[in-house]
Image (cartoon, grey):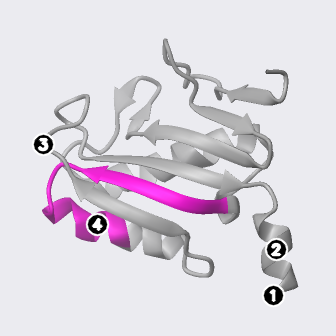
Amino acid sequence: MSNVERLNPPGMAFPGMSQGVGCGDFVLVSGQVALKDKQIIAAGDPAGQTEQVFRNIEAVLAEAGLTLAHVVSLRCYLTSTDAYQAYAAVKNRLFADNPPAASAMVVTALVLPEIMVEVEAVAWRHALAKAAEV
């Protein structure tokens, strides 16, 4: 499996999982939550948590030499419907020019009670080249 790259930015390693995995043309980013240096960021603030989540996704993608512009799919888990508006506002700002395929679902809880937002991402290494051809 030498063509699989494990992506774990400094300070983001978590036992039993990779923060991202590069497989050929795709990079799969594990569900990211509002943690930085093992501390919860913006407890009670879904917009602040979403900002941190996307900073974490950016850090994982950077390990593969990619950016948010390479993201082609997002899957979001929220702990309440009230959090969706804040999540959507941040997502729509970050992906205004090239919105990815996306889904969002409300779940009963996430791994820590203070966490309100978790997002998985899929990036395609050739997304920018294909967008330029259009």
CB under 8 Å between discs 1 and 3: no
Q: Is residue 86 magenta?
A: yes
Q: Residues under labels 3 and 4: Cα distance?
A: 18 Å
The amino acid sitting under disc 1 is Val
> Residue 23 appears at what percent x and percent y?
74, 38
Q: Give yes or no for contact between labels 2 and 3 (Cβ–Cβ under 8 Å).
A: no
Secondary structure at numbered mark 1? loop
- Residue position for label 2: 130
Give the mark, 2 or 3, whose residue is nearer the N terminus.
Answer: 3
> Hey, which residue is sitting farthest front in the picture?
1
Mark 3 Cα within 10 Å, few/some/many (few <14, many 20+)? few
The disc placed on residue 108 is 3
Q: Which mark is residue 134?
A: 1
Precedes in sequence: disc 3 or disc 4: 4
Q: Is residue 122 left or right of residue 81?
A: right
Quick one: which residue is furthest to the top in this view? 15
What residue is pinned by disc 4? 86
